[in-house]
Image (spheres, rainbow, N blue to C red):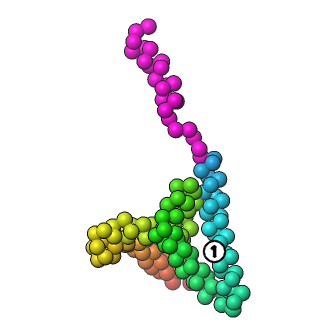
Amino acid sequence: MNKIDQMKNKYPSMVDEISPKNTVVINSLRAFWVGGLICTLGQFINNIFLRYGFTTIEAAGITSVSLIFLGSALTALNVYEVIGKYAGGGSAIPITGFANSMVSAAVEHKAEGYVFGLGAKIFTIAGPVIVYGIIASTALGIIYYFIH
């Protein structure tokens, strides 16, 4: 056997040694329980506002604002990054993940100034989401108008 054939035979074992191990199940479980915990926290906050006499619509709005504030504050304190590394998509999917993406973009570019850094970069993530939301809601409104 020549040297090239020996390397071809050895290559798969070398790849197996240095390749990261598959952790899909563990990552999925982490994402599930952390995302569920965030949603449970949101339901708890919503129930508190309902108990204090807010209507369902008012409580839902205040709960959304509370979760956005919480996600923003945890991002500013560098806590949400730790949660995100642990939970992956479980921390990105709820509304707190959207707040995190906006605030982290702003914090990252704060050194460039308040207008061109913080003010402009905060819409790096929010801009496409807002545009998509407007286009989708307009299209659905037109469809709804013609169906009913």
Mark 1 neighbour density, 10 Å: few (under 14) some (14–19) many (20 or more): many
Horizontal and vertical percent for residue 11?
A: 46, 23
Q: Amino acid at mark 1?
A: Gly
Residue 59 is a magenta residue: no
The residue positioned 52% from the left and 69% from the top of the image is: 74
Q: Is residue 102 left or right of residue 39?
A: left
* Residue 74 visible in the current orientation: yes
**Residue at disc 1, secondary structure:** helix
Q: Count the marks: how many? A: 1
The residue positioned 44% from the left and 7% from the top of the image is: 1
The residue positioned 50% from the left and 35% from the top of the image is: 19
Q: Is residue 67 left or right of residue 8?
A: right
Residue in front for this viewpoint, 144 or 50:
50
* Residue 143 visible in the current orientation: no
Residue 14 is a magenta residue: yes
Residue at the farthest bottom position: 53
The residue range painted magenta reads: 1-24
Residue position marked by numbered label 1 in the rendering: 42
The residue positioned 43% from the left and 77% from the top of the image is: 134
Residue at the farthest top position: 1
Residue in front for this viewpoint, 34 or 134:
34
- The quarter holding residue 47 reads bottom right
In the displayed structure, 119 sits above or below 101; it is below
Q: Is residue 79 left or right of residue 58?
A: left
- The quarter holding residue 6 reads top left
Horizontal and vertical percent for residue 8?
A: 44, 19
Chief secondary structure of the magenta span? Answer: helix
Residue in front for this viewpoint, 62 or 135:
62
- In the rendered image, the quadrant that contains the C terminus is bottom right
